[in-house]
Amino acid sequence: MSDAPALPLLEIEDLHVAYGHVEAVRGVSLSVPEGSIVTLIGPNGAGKTSILSALAGLHRPRAGTVRLGGADVTGLPAHRAVAAGLSLVPEGRAILGRMTVEENLVLAGERRQPPGALLAAIDEQCRRFPILGERRGQLAGSLSGGQQQMLAFARALLARPRILLLDEPSMGLSPILVGQIFEMVEQIHREGATILLVEQNARLALSVAHHAYVLEHGKLVLSGPARELAEDPRVQAAYLGGGH
């Protein structure tokens, strides 16, 4: 196996995101190598979700450049961002609660799967998340929080992403379910996914990521290999509850 670093799949240069006169992201530059897990950590309001929203086409950046596989994807609307390969699992999951599990999956995959392949792709996700297979005909809104997160993952994967954007996947879940969700994140990565992860649980995020960026007040203040940042006294004091 080569030790050469993987080429960047996602490159962000001098990204600015604003809401009216409030600048949430101020000149952020980062990259995500193909086949890696990269995490963004930082306090609430640091701009982490704003970066993912800009990548996913939910909010147009004020300035900066985003490239995916070398192609300029800056400011694409959401449907075109998905088509380009940027697939977001949003904070709060955003499933369609009045539709069944199956209907959620069909809607997510029908424009991204090859003709005739959608049913097989849905079956594959139901094997990955067996509870979804058991509850294909159940209204999505009646699922538990953990099951809804699994459905949100399956929806994103059905879009055949080049990079999976995960926004706070542990939010609102019990510690046991959080562990299960992050086991799924690692399994999806082992199967070849490239992942950009925003996660409030910094210790957990750093434990699964290869590289990490620390964001404060819309600016990057630290970056480096995740294991090294987990040992950094500044990160430990601010996000990991002090030293060991």
Image (tube, rainbow, N blue to C red):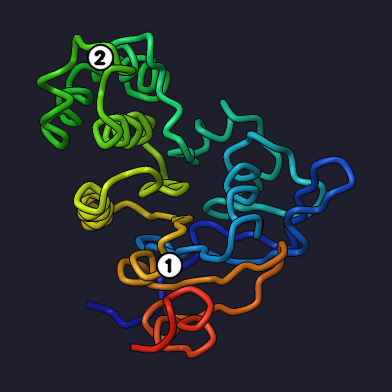
When asked about the image quadrant of residue 231, the answer is bottom left
SS state under label 1: helix
Q: Three-letter amino acid code at disc 1?
A: Ala
Residue 85 percent coordinates (x, y): 47, 39
SS state under label 2: helix
Residue 199 percent coordinates (x, y): 45, 57
Sequence-wise, the earlier of marks 1 and 2 is 2
In the displayed structure, would residue 182 be above or below residue 73?
below
Residue at left offset 30%, top offset 33%: 145
In the displayed structure, would residue 79 be above or below residue 202?
above
Q: On the image, numbered disc 1 is attached to which residue? A: 202
Horizontal side of residue 31 vs 26, given as left or right: left
Q: On the image, numbered disc 2 is attached to which residue? A: 102
In terms of depth relative to the viewer, which is nearer, 47 or 88? 47
Horizontal side of residue 39 vs 15, given as left or right: left
Task: Please indicate, yes or no, whether residue 163 appears anywhere in the rendered image.
Answer: no
